[in-house]
Image (tube, coloured by chain):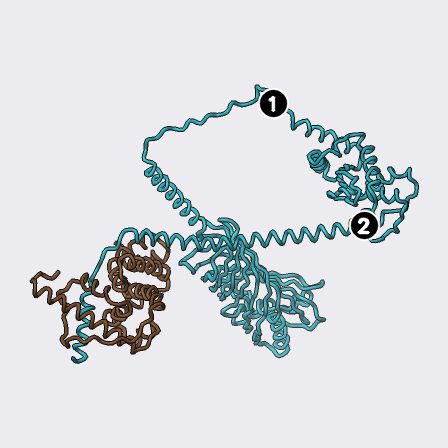
Chain colours: A cyan, B brown
Amino acid sequence: MNDMEKRKFEDSFQEAFKDAEVNPSENVWTNIELDLEKADGDKMKRRLVFFKMLAAASIVFAMSVAGIGYYVFQRSDMGNIAQQTTPITDQNKLKDSASTSSLKNDSPGSSLQEADTNANVSGNETQTNKSLAPGADAQQRKDELLRQDAGLSPTAKANDETRNGGNKRSNNGTIAKGATALIAADQNPNSTVSQTTPKANGSDKTANTTTSTSATSTQDDLIISASAAVAAGTTRKLPELYQPAEPKLQLPVSNADPGRLLLAKLADEEKKFALEEKNQAKKKTENLWTSVGFAAGGVNANNPSVAPVPSNALYSANSANTASTQSKASGVSYSVGVSVGTKISNRWVLQGGINYLTQNYDYTANSVVVVNNNFASPKAASLNELFAPQLLDATATTTVAQTFPYNINNNVRFVNVPLQAGYLVVNRKFGFQLNAGVSTDVFLQNTITPDGGGLTKTTQGSGDESPYRSLNFSGLMGTEFSYRLGDRYRLSLNPGLRYPFSSVYKSNTGVDSTPLTFDVGLRFRYIFH
Amino acid sequence: MLSENELIEGCRKGNRASQKALYEHYCRKMLVVCLRYSKTTAEAEDILQEGFVKVFSALKDFRQESKLETWITRIMVNTALNVQRRKLYLYPMVDVEELNLPDTEVSVSGIHFSQLLEMIQTLPHGCQIVFNLFAIEGFSHKEIAEQLGISEGTSKSQFARAKSLMQAKLLKESTYYERYGEAKI
C-alpha cells in the first residue's frame, strides 16, 4: 500500500464529515447564556469588590485620623488639668473648687469628656489634702485618683446633688443618663457633660454616677426640664380619637397563570432596564460640545535673524540694534476664547473656535527715532517708527539718535481661529487627549509704551504702515487633561505650543522672527446631548 | 440576515441576539466535531457549551486571518482535547500493537456519517483522539505528540491501531450489507 492509498482512507473520512450536522438539544444555548450572564456578573462583582475595598480603606483611614485626633485632644486636655490643679487644704472649699474647676474647663467648643475630669479631680485632690505640682504627669494623677477609696464618691455625689438641686435623675440607670447626655448635647452644644465611671477598687461602694454640669445654672435647669420632658414622653399616649384605624389592604383576586404573569413582568422589567440603559448611554456620549477657556504662558523670541533695511551707516547700525532688541525680546502671552468640538470617530475629535491673544514684550532701547528732523518730539525706538514713515512716504527722513537706556513695552494683539484634530488616548471620566492643528492669526494692533516721560505711547493697527503681517498661520500642538463633572460638563487643562509658520514681521522689515509660545489653558466644556 | 462581520461585531459588543445567531449558525457542525471526541451526546454537548463560551469571550481577539468556521472548529477541538486530557492523565496512552488485518483498503464511501461517528465513538479512548486528529483534522504525528504530550511513536501506534479497528468495523459492516442486502443508510 503506497502513501497515496494510505492518505485516501483518511481523506474519505474528511469527506464524510465535511457537511455533517447534528442538532444539539435546546438546553445547550440556555446553559451558554447562563454562563455568559455569569461571566458578566463576575466582571461586575470584581468592580464591586474594588469599590468595597476602597470604601473599607476610606473608613479605616477616617477612623485612624479620628483616633489620632482624639488621642491628641486627650493629651492636651490632661495637660490642661495638670496646669489648673492647685493644692487646696480647706474641706469647706470642696464645692467651690469642684464647681470652679468645672467651669474653668468648660470652655466653649469643648466636647463630651469621659470619667475623671475636672470636677472629680479637684474634689479628690481636696479631700486627700494632697497637692500635685502644676504640670505633673496627668497619668500619675489619674492613677492616684483611682487609688482613692469609695469615700470620694459621696463627695462627688453631694456635689452633683447640690448642682442639680436635688434632682435624682443622675443616679438611676442608663436611660436617664443617656437621655440627659443627649439632650445636653442637643440643647447646648457648647456645654460639657462630665461622667464619673464607677471605680472598682475593691470596696465597690461607688455606683453609676452621672454628673451633668454646665457653664451656667440656667443651662443646667434647661437640661433638667428637657430630661423630665423626655421621661414623661415615654409614657404619654395619644387620646383614642387620634389613633388611626388599621388600614386593610384588599388584594385583587387574579385567575391569570402565575408563570405567564411572571414572564410578562420580567419582559416589562427588561424593557424598562433597556430603556434606562439607553438613556444612560445617551447621557454618557460626548459628540458635540462647546467650551470657554483662558490660557497664560510665555513667548520665546526663538533666535530671530535681523537684517534691517539700510539707508546710511549710522542709521543702519542703530536701527539694526533696535530691531534686534525688539525682536529678541521674550514676554508673556494671554488668551481667552470660545471653541466648539465634535467627535468624528470613536477616538478622533475635531475642535475649532476663536481666541483673542495678547502678548507683552519688554525690551531696553538706547536710542530714539526722529522723523523729518523733528527733534522736539522724538519717538520711542521700535520697528514701527523705524519703518512706518519710510513705507508711507519715500521722501521722509528718519534719524536714530543715541540716548540713555530706557524700557519699552510692546503689546501685540491678535485674533486667532484655531482648528485642531485631537486623539483621545483616555476617554473616561478622566480624559487624556493629544491635539494638533493650525491657527489663522489675524493681527489687530500693537502698542509701544516707553518708560519715563518725554516719549509718547503709540498704537498702530494692521495695514501698510505696520511692521507686522496682517495675516499669519501658526502650527498648534498640545495635550488636554480633562475631568468630567456630571453629565454635561468637563473641565480641562491644556498645555500647548504655538509656532508661526512664517515671520510675524513683514519681509521688507528685514526681521525674521517666529516666536514660540508655550501656554497652559483652562477650559470649561459644556456637552450637548 | 446579518453578515458574518456584523455578527462578529455584535458578539464583540456582547449583544446576546448576535451571539445566539452565531451559535445557531455553527452549533450543528460543531456538535459533530464534539461528538467525534466524546463517547456520548451529553458529553459532546458539554464540550459544545464550554467551547461556545470560549468562542464568545475570545472573539475580540479573532483577527479574521482564517475563516470563522475554521477558528471555531479549532476552539472546539482544543476544548475537547482539554476535557480528554484529564482522562488521558488517568489512562495514559502507550504504544499498542497493530492488529493483523488484511491489507485491503476498506472504503467509507456511501456510509452515513452517523454510522462512522458511532464507530469512532466505540474506539478506545487514546485511539479515538489520535484518529480524529490525524485522519480528520489533518495534524501530523509530530504535532499530535506535542499537543498530547506523548511520543511521536505512541501517536503512530495509536493511529495504526485505530485504523485497524475502524477497518475491521467497516469490513464487518460491508459484509453485513452484502449478506443481507440491506440498503446502506
- Label located before the other in sequence (1 or 2): 2
Question: Is A258 above or below relative to B142?
Answer: above
Q: Residue furthest right?
A: A90
Residue A341 percent across, percent down from the top left: 46, 55
User: Is any atom of residue A433 visible in this view?
Assistant: yes
Please report the residue visible at 48 percent of the width from the left and 60 percent of the height from the top: A426
Q: Is residue A115 left or right of residue A364?
A: right
Q: Which residue is mark 2?
A: A143
Image disc number at residue A238: 1
Residue B152 percent across, percent down from the top left: 30, 77
Going by the numbered disc 1, the residue's amino acid type is Leu
Q: CA distance from mark 1 to mark 2?
A: 51 Å
- Mark 1 — on which chain does it sit? A
Q: Is residue A478 left or right of residue A372?
A: left
Q: Secondary structure at mark 2?
A: helix
Q: Quadrant of residue B163?
A: bottom left
Please report the residue visible at 37 percent of the width from the left and 44 percent of the height from the top: A270
Going by the numbered disc 2, the residue's amino acid type is Asp
User: Is any atom of residue A104 visible in this view?
Assistant: no
In the rendered image, the quadrant that contains the N terminus of chain A is: bottom left
Label 1 environment density (alpha carbons within 10 Å; few <14, some 14–19, many ≥20): few
Residue B106 percent across, percent down from the top left: 14, 71
Q: Name the residue nearer the viewer: A423 or A28.
A: A28
Please report the residue visible at 34 percent of the width from the left and 66 percent of the height from the top: B87
Whether marks 1 and 2 lie on the same chain? yes
- Mark 2 — on which chain does it sit? A
Q: Secondary structure at mark 1?
A: loop
